[in-house]
Image: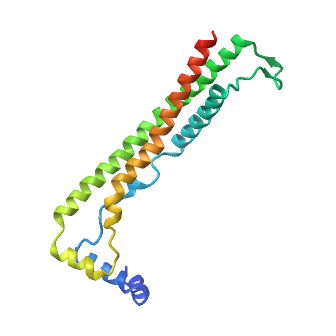
Amino acid sequence: MFAPFLQKHAAKSPTLLRAVSWALRGIRLSYPDVSFLKDPLSHITRLERRNLILASSAGFLITKANLVPREISALGISLSAPEQGVFLFFVSGMIIYFWVAFVAFGLSDFFIWRKAYQDYLEEREASIESESEESNMAFEMSGLPSLAWLYKKAGLLSFFRAVVEYLFPLIFGFYVAVLGLLGWFCSS
């Protein structure tokens, strides 16, 4: 089944032929899977994250730059001072809604990502325990470049990504929602 493929590509890539040869002998040449480094958010969670960041950014501008509208001319609405406070309350409510939605969708994605990371750690530990002199020699002879740098940095990179993808939007959204609620409270 693989013979035509190997014959076709053996001349072009002797490294590939050696790697396949060692793999067919049952000698492990690869490290644990690092698929946990891919995008940890599903499409729907990414949309909720975007909504949270957009609503929080608008809320930040409204609260910090005092951009509470006095009039919404397209709708023919003018807002008095107490109504501007209600507007702040409404914006804070939207931010809280998007915050809760992101937490709801993000938690399941976070648990899936964390499980993939746990699987990686267990696979890495098993790989270290099962390394033999023969497999180390086979890897060196294969001519494949070492990926040790990738596996040393994978944990740090995944932690950094989790902070950027999950924690920053949650902290920013919470902060702006509190600012809006304080602005509403102070205006009433």
**Which residue is drawn at the image coordinates 52% and 28% (left, top)?**
175
Instruction: Using the rendered image of the protein, determine whether residue 102 is visible from the camera's viewpoint.
Output: no
Q: Is residue 185 above or below residue 56?
A: above
Circle count: 0
Q: Position of residue 73 (x, y in %)?
A: 83, 24
Image quadrant in which you'd find residue 12: bottom left
Residue that lies at the very extreme toward the top in this rendered image: 188
In the rendered view, does 44 fall on the left or right side of 130? right
Which residue extends farthest front?
65
47, above or below 131, in the image: above
Observer-nearest residue: 141 or 59? Answer: 59
At a point 61% along the width and 34% down the height, the residue shown is 57
Q: Foreground residue, 86 or 46?
A: 86
Indicate the quadrant where residue 7 lies.
Answer: bottom left
Question: Could one spot residue 77 in this view of the protein?
Answer: yes
Find residue 31 and report its horizontal and vertical position in percent.
29, 65
Please state if 152 lies on the left or on the right of 74 as rendered. left
Residue 154 percent location from the top left of the image:
35, 56
Residue at the extreme bottom: 11
Q: In the shown orientation, is residue 116 left or right of residue 91?
A: left
Instruction: Pick the quarter of the image with the C terminus.
Output: top right
Colour scheme of the rendered structure: rainbow
Picture quarter containing residue 30? Answer: bottom left
> At 29% across and 49% down in the image, what residue appears?
118
Q: Residue at x 43, y 85 (%)?
A: 9
Q: Quadrant of the N terminus?
A: bottom left
Q: Residue 65: percent from the left, percent from the top?
A: 67, 29
Report whether 81 appears left or right of 163. right
